[in-house]
């Protein structure tokens, strides 16, 4: 598994990394986003969706758990922050969603057992006045 570290000094840095990642994504890919509250996970997904051609507002699915958007490829945006156990993850039926879409999962820890081996993992951290992103493929 190769990892790459990127320092995100601005919104444009975040957008550039999102655009690069999206250029490599295809149907069936899963992107797991880790990091503290407010570190930029949802903003990153917003940039990814924009790059995929989604022109509707992309909001955090914190309360609804899953938002779906349609571009050339369907996009699932999941937020598992409020879930308390793995059974709740199973009830969502995420595995069935993976096949025909690109899926972004914020707070994916409870879903680790069902994430595909080829899941792209993004770790967001605050580092001084910037954010650090570690990308693991």
Image: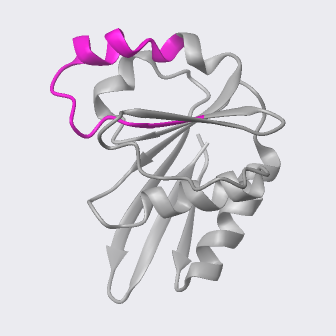
Does 130 sit left or right of 19 as displayed? left
Where the C terminus falls, by quadrant? top right
| Residue in the foreground of this view, choosing between 105 and 124 | 105
| Image point (67%, 16%), residue name | 99
| Residue in the foreground of this view, choosing between 6 and 111 | 111
Does 70 sit left or right of 59 as displayed? right
| Residue farthest toward the bottom in the current orientation of the protein | 129
Where the N terminus falls, by quadrant? top right
Residue 22 position within the rendered picture, expressed as x and y whole percent measured from the top left: 74, 51
Number of callouts in the render?
Answer: 0
| Image point (36%, 24%), residue name | 111
| Residue in the foreground of this view, choosing between 97 and 70 | 70
| Residue in the foreground of this view, choosing between 125 and 58 | 58
| Image point (71%, 58%), residue name | 50
> Is residue 67 depicted above or below 54 in this figure?
above
Colouring used for the render: one colour
Chain part drawn in magenta: 76-95
Residue 79 lies within the magenta run: yes
> Is residue 46 depicted above or below 117 in this figure?
below
Residue 130 position within the rendered picture, expressed as x and y whole percent measured from the top left: 42, 84
Residue 36 lies within the magenta run: no
Does 13 sit left or right of 24 as displayed? left
Residue 52 position within the rendered picture, expressed as x and y whole percent measured from the top left: 77, 50
| Residue farthest toward the front in the current orientation of the protein | 56
Residue 28 position within the rendered picture, expressed as x and y whole percent measured from the top left: 70, 24
| Image point (71%, 19%), residue name | 100
User: Residue 26's quadrant in the figure?
Assistant: top right
Does 64 sit left or right of 86 as displayed? right
């Amino acid at each position: 598994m190769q990892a790459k570290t990127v320092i995100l000094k601005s919104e444009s840095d975040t957008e550039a990394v999102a655009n690069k990642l999206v250029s490599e994504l295809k149907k069936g890919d899963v992107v797991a986003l880790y990091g503290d509250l407010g570190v930029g996970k949802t903003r990153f997904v917003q940039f990814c969706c924009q790059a995929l051609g989604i022109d509707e507002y992309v909001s955090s699915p914190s309360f609804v758990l899953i938002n779906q958007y349609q571009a050339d490829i369907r996009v699932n945006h999941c937020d598992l922050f409020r879930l308390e156990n793995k059974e709740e993850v199973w009830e969502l039926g995420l595995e069935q969603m993976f096949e025909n879409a690109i899926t972004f999962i914020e707070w994916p820890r409870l879903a680790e057992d069902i994430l595909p081996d080829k899941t792209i993992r993004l770790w967001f951290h605050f580092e001084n006045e910037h954010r650090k992103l570690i990308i693991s493929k």
